[in-house]
Structures are given as structure tokens and as C-alpha cells.
Image: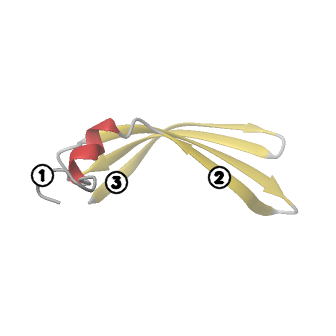
Amino acid sequence: MVERVDIRHVFVDGKDVCMWYDLVTSTPAGTALVAEWHHVQDDKIQSITVLFDARPFAPMFPTPGSPGH
């Protein structure tokens, strides 16, 4: 499914790290631009927030009651 991750940029601000990357997939969704925000505390990742447009992936996951489910 995931072919590779192409990192566009990494920003560091104290204990916060933001990473922008292209998630290249072998699915009909193609490539998705993704942003991740990592918060580090005591030298460990405490939280990760991921943002991306999920609409291109929606046809791969039919909802209950939809045709083909």
C-alpha cells in the first residue's frame, strides 16, 4: 500500500516537531500530503497528531449499508 514517504520539510520548535511529507501509495488514492506534529517530553514522543485529506481514501473503506459492504 505505502510505496514511500518523501519528506518535504521538518520544523523543530523546542519540544515540538512538525513534519510535512508526501505519502506515496500504490492505491487509487495516489499521493497524499501529510502533516505530523510530534510532541516530545522526557526524551520520548508523548503525542502525535496527523493531518491529511482522507477523501481520496474513502472509496477503499465502504461504510455499513453502502453497496458492496
Which residue is identified by label 3?
4
**Which mark is in front, 2 or 1?**
1
Which residue is identified by label 1?
67
Tell me if residue 1 comes above or below residue 24 in the rendering: below
Q: Nearer the N terminus, badge 3 or badge 1?
A: 3
- Say what amino acid the circle numbered 2 marks: Ile
Bin the neighbour count of mark 1 within 10 Å (Cα to Cα): few under 14, some 14-19, many 20 and up. Answer: few
Q: 63 or 14: which is nearer to us? A: 63
Identify the disc placed on residue 6: none
What residue sits 58% from the left and 41% below the top?
19
Bin the neighbour count of mark 2 within 10 Å (Cα to Cα): few under 14, some 14-19, many 20 and up. Answer: few
What residue sits 64% from the left and 39% below the top?
18
User: Where's residue 50, x and y in %?
Assistant: 55, 45
Q: Are marks 3 and 1 in contact (CB under 8 Å)?
A: no
Count the labels in the image: 3
Quadrant of the image occupied by residue 17:
top right
- CA gap, disc 3 to disc 2? 20 Å
User: Where's residue 66, x and y in %?
Assistant: 19, 50
Describe the element under mark 3 as helix, strand or loop. strand
Q: Nearer the N terminus, badge 3 or badge 2?
A: 3
Describe the element under mark 2 as helix, strand or loop. strand
Which colour assignment does the render follow?
secondary structure
Which residue is identified by label 2?
48
Q: 15 or 67: which is nearer to us? A: 67
What residue sits 71% from the left and 55% below the top?
47
Q: 69 or 32: which is nearer to us? A: 69
